[in-house]
Amino acid sequence: MNKAQLVEAIALDANISKIDARKAVDAIIRVTVQSLREGERLTLTGLGTFSVQQKAARVGRNPRTGAAVKIPPRKAVKFRPTIELE
């Protein structure tokens, strides 16, 4: 399912216009991204928990040449589903 299909499904399920559904989806995405950038956890009951995890710097390998490559530290989003989804 892509964003347009999600908007359409929400509009049908909530009996609202696609414009209002698109505004709601955009707002959810915007708020989620902002809270994750600030390092907060986001828990959606019935769905799961989004959190930011710090990945340490490490040494990897270039698959073409086999040469060692430094991979810098980074942040990654982690999602843990609720028991209902497992």
Image (cartoon, rainbow, N blue to C red):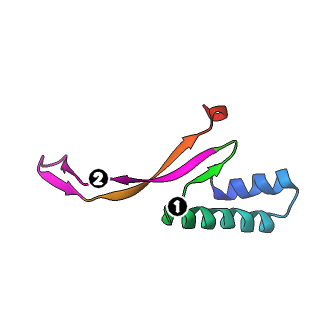
Instruction: Give the Cα distance between marks 1 and 2.
Output: 18 Å
Q: Residue at x 86, y 61 (%)?
A: 16
Q: Position of residue 67 (x, y in %)?
A: 11, 50
Give yes or no for residue 61 being in the magenta stretch. Answer: yes
Q: Position of residue 59 (x, y in %)?
A: 18, 50
Picture quadrant where residue 7 is located = bottom right
Q: Residue at x 18, y 56 (%)?
A: 70
Left or right: residue 64 versus residue 77 is left
Q: Main secondary structure of the magenta part?
A: strand
Task: Look at the picture and state if 84 lies above or below 67.
Answer: above
Q: Residue at x 55, y 55 (%)?
A: 41
Residue positioned most to the front: 40
Q: Which residue is mark 1?
A: 36
Left or right: residue 50 versus residue 13 is left
- Give the mark nearest the N terminus, 1 or 2: 1
Q: Which residue is mark 2?
A: 56
Span shown in magenta = 48-71
Within-10-Å neighbours for mark 1: few <14, some 14–19, many 20+? some
